[in-house]
Amino acid sequence: MTASLGSLLSDVLGHNLPVRITAYDGTDLGPPDAEATIVLRSPDALRRVVTAPGELGLARAYVAGDLDVEGDIHAALQLHERLPDVRLGARQLAAVARLVGMDTLRRLPPPAIEARLRGIRHSKERDAAAIAHHYDVSNRFYELVLGASMTYSCALFDGPSTTLDAAQAAKYDLICQKLRLEPGMRLLDVGCGWGSMLIHAARQYGVKAVGVTLSKRQAEFAAKRVAEAGVGDRVAVRLQDYRDVDDGPFDAISSIGMFEHVGAAGLATYFGRLHDLLRPEGRLLNHGIVHPPSPRSRFARRGFIDRYVFPDGELHDVGSVQTVMESSGLEVRHSENLREHYALTLRCWGENLERHWDEVVDEVGAARARVWRLYMAASARNFEKGNTGLQQVLGVRADRGRSGFALRPAY
């Protein structure tokens, strides 16, 4: 049996493997000194791959614990990158049946934390459910992974030695400078998370700020942080959909890491609503993940990210984003890609996760910890390889051509 499983894996994966592979029956393939070892802990790992070929089956096997990764998960992902679309042929399926039994094609229940949303895609109700799936998990969990800054978006590094907290503060400074914030201005932060942008802008730039989020736990945590920071008289945190904000105009709007939840069908509504909430010459800074133009510009609706990380999340190419912004009356004045910075940010978060692994598992369970380990490592590699980018796009409500920009502005 050992030779049969080993032969099957060699047939599917080829030789000269970049990782070591061991299995429940004693199979041992690949270099013994590899940086990572993929462990097949039970025949259920094969069942999951057969019944959900490709990325989703492998992810389910890992989240369920039927497949494990020992060592550097970034190194383990080299195998997936080399063989992104593994499909078993009839001969190989027959070999799996001989190894696992005649119930090979019996679909196992997916891990319980897999998202199953109902209702109209990107309706207010379904968007709230999607946000709750990802964010209403545990504020303590996010503290362990994100660190003291409690910021879940791309940081800005001077170099690889920059600390995560310093890089996050630098990112907020960059956004505040692009928005040209001044004391007394009104700022709206869309998707305010745990309140870090609100606190930074109020403390460092003297603004009056409103933050909105669909996450109940985020709103509660952010309000507490705002009070502790001593800016409660200038900052309000609301559990509210941005589409329901009706107390404009605002001098500036920041949207940091929320844009991925909007969806292609909602882009015009999103930018149109933010345009209407700005005063003339008011600025919008949209900070979001983008994808190079391709037929796969959105998250695969049956893939790992959609099922386990960002249900209903969609990525767009920056050209489409800027086109819709301009069509909504927002003149694009500056665009900057921070792709490499997000790769560094994700590696910092991954290191935090590994360092606090036992506490994370105690807090949110092994399955969710595994989801985050895989998601952050895969995302970091995508940013490093240029498969995804992070674009900050600065727009202005330039009514009748009046932008308020100097002839040679810094931004």
Image: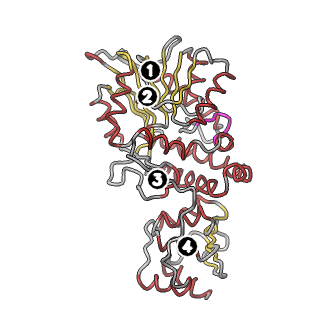
Q: Are the residues at dot 2 and dot 1 in contact (C-beta closer than 8 Å)?
A: yes
| Sequence order check, earlier mark of 4 and 2 | 4
Dominant SS type (magenta): loop
Q: Nearer the viewer, mark 1 or mark 4?
A: 1
Query: Mark 1: which secondary structure?
Result: strand
Look at 33% across and 35% down and name the residue there. Answer: 322
User: Does the magenta run of residues contain 121?
Assistant: no
- Is any part of residue 244 visible from this angle? yes
Dividing the picture into quadrants, the one containing residue 72 is: bottom right
Lower sequence index among marks 1 and 4: 4
- Number of the front mark, 3 or 4: 3
Separation of marks 1 and 3 at Cα, in angstroms: 31 Å
Q: Nearer the viewer, residue 345 or 131?
A: 131
Residue that label 3 marks: 306
Closer to the camera, 357 or 194? 194
Q: Which mark is residue 252?
A: 1
Q: CA distance from mark 1 to mark 4?
A: 52 Å
Q: CA distance from mark 3 to mark 2?
A: 26 Å
Residue 109 image position (x, y, % from top left): 54, 66
Instruction: Say the numbered circle drawn on residue 285.
Output: 2
- Which of 169/273 is in front? 273
Q: Are marks 3 and 2 in contact (CB under 8 Å)?
A: no
- Say what secondary structure mark 3 lies in: helix
Magenta segment includes 150: yes
Left or right of residue 325: residue 306: right
Task: Identify which residue is drawn at 55% across, 73% down.
Answer: 17
Could you tell me if the residues under marks 1 and 3 are in contact, i.e. CB atoms within 8 Å? no
